[in-house]
Amino acid sequence: MECTVSWTGAAGTRSGMGFVAETGSGHVLTMDGAPDAAKPENGGQNLAPRPMETVLAGTGGCTAYDVVLILKRGRHDVRGCSVKLTSERAPVDPKVFTSIHMHFTVSGKGIPAAAVERAIAMSHDKYCSATIMLGKTAEITTSFELTEA
């Protein structure tokens, strides 16, 4: 797996903190920093997610993918899955994630709550590389709600 991240600056001015990532699979992702009122030349323009937001989003995508796949492999009629991640970060550099809570909302027809709980646990403990990596610095907790669809 590979990725190339390039600084774009702000609209070609070579100031700002915009970046474009091109993934090995040929997709493009933009990132930007928060504006810095004290030193505008060091801040971003808030035109895209922050790099750490993309880490959190990737983690959500990784675990949601697992949950859907595990439920489908269990022949459950899963029709929707979302996960809301809330996090805390260390106050000083490196500002690693110190806690992450993942709240899953799963919808389907006749899915037992135990199957959803098991799928989340399997993702958390065995399959989701992002969750397992972030678990080295962050306490990760989960919850879920199941709706009939």
Image (cartoon, rainbow, N blue to C red):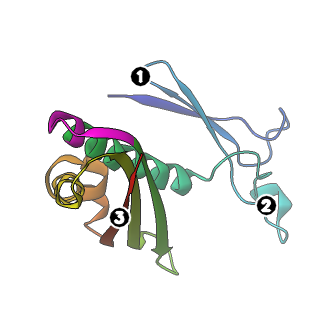
Image coordinates of residue 8 in percent, x first then y, are 71, 35
Q: CA distance from mark 3 to mark 2?
A: 35 Å
Sequence-first tag of 1 and 3: 1
Front in this rendered view, residue 138 or 39? 138
Report which quarter residue 115 is drawn in.
Answer: bottom left
Q: Residues within 10 Å of mark 3 (few under 14, many from 20)?
A: some
Task: Describe the element under mark 1 as helix, strand or loop.
Answer: loop
Which residue is labeled 2 in the image?
35
Front in this rendered view, residue 68 or 42? 68
Q: Residue furthest bottom?
A: 91
Identified at 41% across, 64% down, the residue is 103
Which residues lie in the magenta part? Answer: 71-79
Disc 3 to disc 2: CB gap under 8 Å:
no
Which residue is labeled 1 in the image?
24
Image coordinates of residue 136 in percent, x first then y, are 25, 67
- Quadrant of the image containing the C terminus: top left
Task: Describe the element under mark 3 as helix, strand or loop.
Answer: strand
Image coordinates of residue 62 in percent, x first then y, are 34, 44
Residue type, label 2: Pro
Task: Describe the element under mark 2 as helix, strand or loop.
Answer: loop
Residue type, label 3: Phe
Which residue is labeled 3 in the image?
144
